[in-house]
């Protein structure tokens, strides 16, 4: 059994949000900080295991734990261990702001996480503070060292590329890949419902970086079936690679292979969709996993061809932490 939509796309990759909460105040996401909303608690550890089980039995081989900041959960390592134990899951990835990475990288590796994405939007200490609201650049950089020491082989750095904020640092980020097997991924700034004005001020098309890469001798690399949305580039003089995530490119959605499940049990077929399908009621008993799988199969057939970001239609995504980015 696999999950496929009406456009011939098969889904191998799940972004599983385990919390909306985040302790950073990134200017493009939560500039005023996270504010808890009234309502139910996030999915429990056992509910998350049941969700991951259903998706993995439907052919998804890669699961990424997201938030918010997923490592804020006190049971984070236990959640990771539960999901890594699922036989079908080959890649258990984590996206983190890195604030706990220096001290806990070895624990996360022991829990079965085998791929890391670390948000790092500036290499300049003061600019990092300006973007994130925290003076923690040095901690994050030490955390990257700790991740290598802990045995992580797949380490990616996520950089949201923004005009007037960090666009002058492209060369510095590229230099990180020269001696270390890092993948630096430049993410084109996306408009969200709460930050339209910020998007207008700071958006730069991703092809501006692509042109620079081609001029410097970088060449495209083929991606795996369960890989993320980045188009990757390699260079003979660099141990690492560069990735570009360009959601405004005309063919971005054609190769979509990922689904999103929120921390409250809603299936999101697109980050910028207009609805989330509530499925938490199918997570209350192990015996419901078969029913959940049937619901997922039916729902994915409803997936549309692509988002409407070019028309400034951001769907229900007010900020990126709400669904898991």
Image (cartoon, helix red, strand yellow):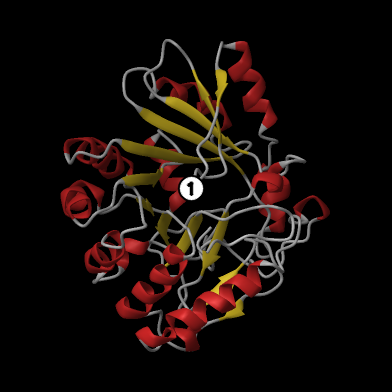
Q: Residue at the right extreme?
A: 311
Using the image as rendered, state which of residue 314 and residue 22 is in the foreground: 314
Query: x%, y% of residue 120?
Result: 42, 41
Report how many numbered discs are placed on residues in the image: 1
Which residue is painted at 28% across and 59% down in the image? 84
Query: x%, y% of residue 32?
Result: 51, 65
Q: What is the secondary structure assignment of the residue under circle 1?
A: helix
Residue 18 in view here:
no
Which residue is painted at 55% across and 58% down in the image? 29
Location of residue 19 by image quarter: bottom left
Query: x%, y% of residue 240?
Result: 39, 24
163 over 113 or under it: above or below: above
In-image side of 134 versus 81 (left or right): right
Q: Which residue is mark 1?
A: 131
90 over 232 or under it: above or below: below
36 over 314 or under it: above or below: below
Which residue is painted at 34% across and 26% down in the image? 181
Which residue is painted at 37% across and 74% down in the image? 48
Residue 248 in view here:
yes
In-image side of 110 versus 6 (left or right): left
Using the image as rendered, state which of residue 278 and residue 242 is in the foreground: 278
Q: Residues within 10 Å of mark 1 (few under 14, many from 20)?
A: many
Using the image as rendered, state which of residue 240 and residue 82 is in the foreground: 82
Query: x%, y% of residue 307?
Result: 74, 56
């Amino acid at each position: 059994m696999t999950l496929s939509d009406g456009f011939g796309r098969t889904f191998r990759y799940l972004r599983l949000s385990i919390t909306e909460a985040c302790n950073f105040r990134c200017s493009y996401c939560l500039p005023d900080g996270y504010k808890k909303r009234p309502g139910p608690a996030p999915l429990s550890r056992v509910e998350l295991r049941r969700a991951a089980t259903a998706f993995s039995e439907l052919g998804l081989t890669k699961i990424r734990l997201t938030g918010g900041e997923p490592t804020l959960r006190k049971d984070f390592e236990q959640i990771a261990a539960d999901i890594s134990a699922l036989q079908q899951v080959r890649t258990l990835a984590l996206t983190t702001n890195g604030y706990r990475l220096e001290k806990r990288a070895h624990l996360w590796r022991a829990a079965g996480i085998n791929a890391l994405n670390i948000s790092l939007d500036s290499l300049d200490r003061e600019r990092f503070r300006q973007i994130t609201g925290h003076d923690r650049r040095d901690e994050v950089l030490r955390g990257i060292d700790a991740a290598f020491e802990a045995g992580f082989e797949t380490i990616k750095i996520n950089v949201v590329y923004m005009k007037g904020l960090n666009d002058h640092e492209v060369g510095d980020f590229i230099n990180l890949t020269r001696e270390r097997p890092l993948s630096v991924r430049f993410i084109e700034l996306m408009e969200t419902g709460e930050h339209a004005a910020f998007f207008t001020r700071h958006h730069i098309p991703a092809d501006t970086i692509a042109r620079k890469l081609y001029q410097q001798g970088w060449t495209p690399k083929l991606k795996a079936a369960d890989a993320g949305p980045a188009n990757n580039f390699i260079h003979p003089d660099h141990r690492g690679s560069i990735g570009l995530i360009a959601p405004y490119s005309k063919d971005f959605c054609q190769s979509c292979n990922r689904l999103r499940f929120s921390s409250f049990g809603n299936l999101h077929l697109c980050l910028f969709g207009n609805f989330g399908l509530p499925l938490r009621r199918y997570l209350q008993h192990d015996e419901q996993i078969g029913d959940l799988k049937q619901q997922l199969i039916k729902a994915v057939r409803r997936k549309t061809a692509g988002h409407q970001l070019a028309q400034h239609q951001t769907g229900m995504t007010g900020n990126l932490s709400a669904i898991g980015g």
